Image: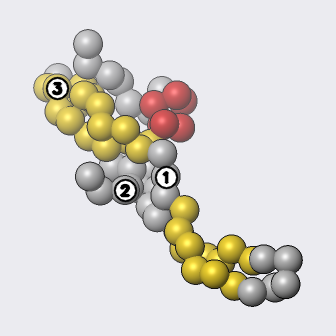
Amino acid sequence: MAKYCEVCGKDTVSGHTITHSDRKIKRTWKPNVKTITVLENGKATRKTVCTRCIRSGKVQRAN
């Protein structure tokens, strides 16, 4: 499953975890995406959408 939102484009971000002794360790932050059924142009299609887009109502779920 791809770790990006098909609605807003939110994607994986990379950076460092910094310890108390100031050592940098590479890490990634992945968005919280769910595969849901969305109504698009009157048809039900499956998309990976982040939970913020689902919660804010940017997509209409198909029931």
- What kind of residue is marked 3? Ala
- What kind of residue is marked 1? Pro
Q: Which residue is mark 1?
A: 31
Q: Which residue is mark 2?
A: 3
Seen in the picture, residue 13 relative to 23 is either above or below; the reply is above
| Label 3 Cα crowd, 10 Å radius (few <14 / some 14-19 / many 20+) | some
- Can residue 41 be seen here? The reply is no
Seen in the picture, residue 17 relative to 40 is either above or below; the reply is below
Q: Residue 34, how many percent across, how many down?
A: 37, 38
Identity of the residue drawn at 48% across and 45% down: 32
| Label 2 Cα crowd, 10 Å radius (few <14 / some 14-19 / many 20+) | some
Choose the circle earlier in sequence order: 3 or 1.
Answer: 1
Q: Secondary structure at mark 2?
A: loop
Choose the circle earlier in sequence order: 2 or 1.
Answer: 2
Q: Secondary structure at mark 1?
A: loop
Q: Are marks 2 and 1 in contact (CB under 8 Å)?
A: yes
Between 39 and 18, the one nearer to me in the picture = 18
Q: Which residue is mark 3?
A: 44
Identity of the residue drawn at 44% across and 61% down: 11
Between 19 and 28, the one nearer to me in the picture = 19
Q: Residue 55, how many percent across, how many down?
A: 52, 28
Tell which residue pokes out farthest to the left in this image.
43
Marks 3, 1: nearer the viewer: 1
Left or right: residue 25 versus residue 1 is: right
Seen in the picture, residue 24 relative to 13 is either above or below; the reply is below
Tell which residue pokes out farthest to the top in this image.
63
Identity of the residue drawn at 35% across and 24% down: 60
Choose the circle earlier in sequence order: 2 or 3.
Answer: 2
Q: Are marks 3 and 1 in contact (CB under 8 Å)?
A: no
Identity of the residue drawn at 26% across and 19% down: 62
Q: Secondary structure at mark 3?
A: strand
Left or right: residue 17 versus residue 30 is: right
